[in-house]
């Protein structure tokens, strides 16, 4: 095959970004190179997200923009993968004649074969079947960074929260084996990576489908032993499965960072029940207390949905209350968006958009105040930073993160070079804090 260029547009969550790293790696192994330039690409792939309606609309508007390119170059192959592809399948081929390929979230490994088939036969393909082997050879994954890497530990979700499309787009929960995860992370360490973020929709139920007798805290303690890896993070934890053992592991394992993403979604018990979340606000708060007691420096984050069907002013006030009581370092805030096939989209008491919008803005303001206040508390403190590389907006500065996952920008006036410090743990004194992150100066090195 002669050398071809691939342009890849990725939307949505970390899982999709990780899948895109797989897509690039698999196609590079077939002699296809990644390009940023849509105009010169031979293959354009959209890795799509369907978590909210807006994300799904984006796919069709993007595809519309690609039509002139296809007219100019009829050999251009346009593929759609990700969650929208998994849900809509063939419908995309019908609605968008410029598309040649629709592939799912569970058969990414078949992508090189699909591309070859299209090149040879000009067929239009839609294949969203699950592949018996959804693990990709970890050596083939083309990582975006050089210090921090994503590692998927499980696929899918079995929780069926009443608003969420993920169980339909990513299938049933399936844990990767301990050996395949550890091999991937050992390989990352050999390549010089220092930090891993373990990915799963519900990492706390890791292992429950395996016959290996392993759970998530066990996995963390095995990863903690891997030489060269300095930091371990994980997303996402489901509050209903947060165990005392996990809290203990977080407190005791030196490499596991003091940062926990524990999505509350709503502070109202009746809304939580209608969401099918499996916990009450009281149970959630009890867990938060345990976490704060075991790990006093913990940084907490959450996902919050406003405007879920039937949400009254009183329910909304309870969401405000829980945010004020937990005092998250940051939240991801969403307006409820009805998704096809999900039970909540059929609920009769949908909330008008102007109410959702007002509640969204209200919580945004509340959270900004809390985030700023928490960041400001770090001013003057010396914290450990893992340097990730140059700052994206200003090349003369370095970028790194605290163990609590706060972004820190560091000027390099002291003559420090990116090459010397990337991947290093550095002591930084925080000189300024704002809503979006911290600024600091280097005061020492840890290695
Ligand atoms: N509408 C709004 N937000 C949603 N999320 C998931 N489904 C929806 C929906 N239909 C949010 C949840 C979840 C995060 C990844 O996206 O807060 O935790
Ligand atoms: Fe969606 Fe709930 Fe699964 Fe999270 S736990 S992916 S919100 S169904």
Image (cartoon, rainbow, N blue to C red):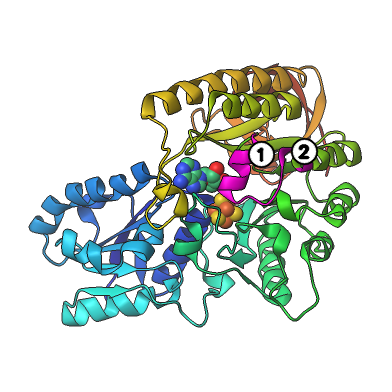
Front residue of 271/236: it is 271
Up-down relation of residue 419 to residue 22 (above or below): above
Q: Residue at 62% of width from left, 46% of height from top?
A: 273
206 sits left or right of 123 in the view: right
Q: Can residue 425 be seen? A: no
Q: Residue at 67% of width from left, 68% of height from top?
A: 187
Front residue of 168/77: it is 168
**Few, some or many C-alpha atoms within 10 Å of disc 2 (few <14, some 14-19, many ≥20)?**
few
Quadrant in which the N terminus is drawn: bottom left
Image location of residue 193, percent across then percent down: 67, 56
**Few, some or many C-alpha atoms within 10 Å of disc 1 (few <14, some 14-19, many ≥20)?**
some
Contact? badges 1 and 2 (CB < 8 Å):
yes
153 falls in the magenta region: no
Q: Can residue 69 be seen? A: yes
Image location of residue 243, percent across then percent down: 82, 55
Q: Which mark is residue 269?
A: 1
- The picture quadrant where one finds residue 45 is bottom left
Up-down relation of residue 172 to residue 49 (above or below): below
* Magenta stretch bounds: 268-283
Q: Which residue is mark 2?
A: 282
- The picture quadrant where one finds residue 331 is top right
270 falls in the magenta region: yes
Instruction: Tell me the element at label 1.
Output: helix
Quadrant in which the C terminus is drawn: top right
Q: Residue at 91% of width from left, 51% of height from top?
A: 252
Up-down relation of residue 232 to residue 358 (above or below): below
* Predominant SS of the magenta segment: helix
Instruction: Tell me the element at label 2.
Output: helix
Query: Upstream in the sequence, badge 1 or badge 2?
Result: 1
Image location of residue 124, percent across then percent down: 20, 74
Q: Residue at 71% of width from left, 43% of height from top?
A: 280
| Disc 1/disc 2 C-alpha distance (Å) | 9 Å
């Amino acid at each position: 095959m002669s050398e071809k260029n691939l342009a890849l547009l990725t939307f949505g969550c970390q899982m999709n970004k990780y899948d895109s790293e797989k897509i690039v790696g698999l196609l590079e192994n077939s002699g296809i190179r990644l390009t940023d330039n849509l105009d010169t690409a031979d293959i354009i792939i959209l890795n799509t997200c369907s978590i909210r309606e807006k994300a799904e609309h984006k796919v069709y508007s993007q595809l519309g923009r690609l039509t002139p390119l296809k007219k100019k170059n009829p050999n251009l192959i346009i593929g759609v993968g990700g969650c929208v592809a998994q849900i809509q399948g063939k419908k995309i081929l019908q609605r968008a004649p410029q598309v040649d390929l629709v592939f799912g979230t569970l058969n990414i490994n078949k992508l090189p074969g699909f591309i070859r088939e299209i090149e040879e036969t000009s067929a239009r393909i839609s294949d969203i079947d699950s592949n018996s082997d959804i693990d990709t050879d970890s050596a083939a994954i083309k990582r975006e960074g050089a210090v921090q890497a994503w590692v998927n530990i499980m696929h899918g979700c079995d929780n069926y929260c009443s608003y969420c499309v993920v169980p339909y787009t990513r299938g049933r929960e399936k844990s990767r084996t301990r050996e395949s995860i550890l091999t991937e992370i050992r390989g990352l360490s050999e390549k010089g990576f220092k930090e891993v973020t373990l990915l799963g929709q519900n990492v706390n139920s890791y292992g429950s489908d395996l016959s290996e007798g392993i759970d998530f805290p066990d996995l963390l303690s095995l990863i903690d032993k891997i030489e060269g890896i300095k930091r371990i993070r994980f997303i996402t934890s489901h509050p209903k499965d947060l165990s005392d053992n996990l809290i203990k592991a977080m407190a005791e394992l030196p490499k596991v960072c003091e940062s926990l993403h524990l999505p509350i979604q709503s502070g109202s018990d009746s809304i939580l029940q209608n969401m099918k979340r499996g916990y009450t606000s009281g149970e959630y708060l009890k867990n938060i207390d345990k976490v704060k007691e075991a790990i006093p420096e913990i940084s907490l984050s959450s996902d919050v949905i406003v405007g879920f069907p039937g949400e009254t002013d009183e329910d909304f006030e309870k969401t405000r209350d829980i945010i004020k009581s937990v005092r998250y370092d940051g939240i991801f805030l969403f307006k409820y968006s009805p998704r096809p096939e999900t039970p909540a989209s059929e609920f009769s008491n949908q909330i008008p958009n102007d109410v959702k919008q007002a509640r969204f803005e209200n919580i945004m303001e509340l959270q900004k105040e809390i985030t700023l206040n928490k960041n400001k508390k770090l001013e003057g403190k010396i914290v450990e930073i893992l340097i990730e590389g140059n700052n994206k907006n200003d090349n003369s500065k370095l970028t790194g993160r605290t163990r609590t996952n706060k972004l820190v920008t560091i000027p390099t006036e002291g003559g420090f070079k990116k090459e010397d410090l990337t991947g290093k743990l550095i002591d930084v004194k925080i000189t300024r804090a704002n809503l979006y992150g911290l600024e600091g100066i280097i005061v020492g090195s840890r290695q």
